[in-house]
Image: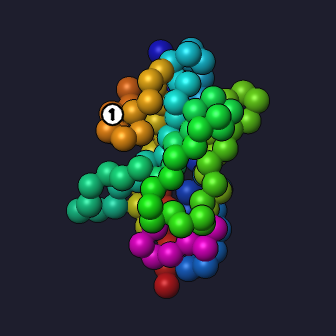
Amino acid sequence: QVQLVESGGGSVQAGGSLRLSCVASGSPYMRQYMAWFRQAPGKEREGVAGIYRDALATYYGDFVKGRFTISQDNDKNLYLQMNSLEPEDTATYYCAADPANRWYTGSYTYWGQGTQVTVSS
């Protein structure tokens, strides 16, 4: 079993930065692949960034355009540094984990409860 707890969301003005954290516990094997997804009201959930084992591989949504960076620490907690935020980035951000690569389908097994990010113009 894997537990994921996100934090770090908040309200910022356009152009600002936020750093999201996801504290992960449980089987390291079951969370080899981790990712950040987001969902805005009335929109489908979309992948923001994904990572595999200490950044052996990373994935980013097309809309990121170099503004966000996904990373992990030695305890395999997950982070998302978001710079140059835009109002379109307003959404609930979720941490996800799976033993297999689910980036292209979004069908991760484990999910956190989400943290809200609001960007004002």
Residue depicted at x 52% and y 46%? 59
Q: Residue at x 60, y 18 (%)?
A: 28
User: Is 121 situated left or right of 72 in this image?
Assistant: left
Q: Is residue 3 above or below residue 111?
A: above
Mark 1, other Cα within 10 Å: few <14 / some 14–19 / many ≥20: some
Image height check: is 32 above or below 91?
above
Is 46 magenta? The answer is no
Say whether residue 6 is visible: no
The x, y position of residue 64, in whole percent, is 51, 63
Q: Dividing the picture into quarters, in which one does residue 58 lie?
A: top right
In depth, the one of 107 and 2 nearer the eye is 107
Residue at 45%, 56% in the rendered image: 61
Question: Residue 7's x, y, as percent?
Answer: 58, 47
Q: Residue furthest right?
A: 74
Whether residue 117 is visible here, answered yes or no, is yes
Q: How many marks?
A: 1
Q: Is residue 116 left or right of residue 67?
A: left
The amino acid type, in three-letter code, at marker 1 is: Ser
Q: Which residues are magenta?
A: 83-89
**Residue 74 lies in quadrant:** top right
Residue 75 at what x, y percent from top left? 72, 27
What residue did someone put label 1 on? 107
Q: Between 105 and 38, which is closer to the camera in this rendering? A: 105
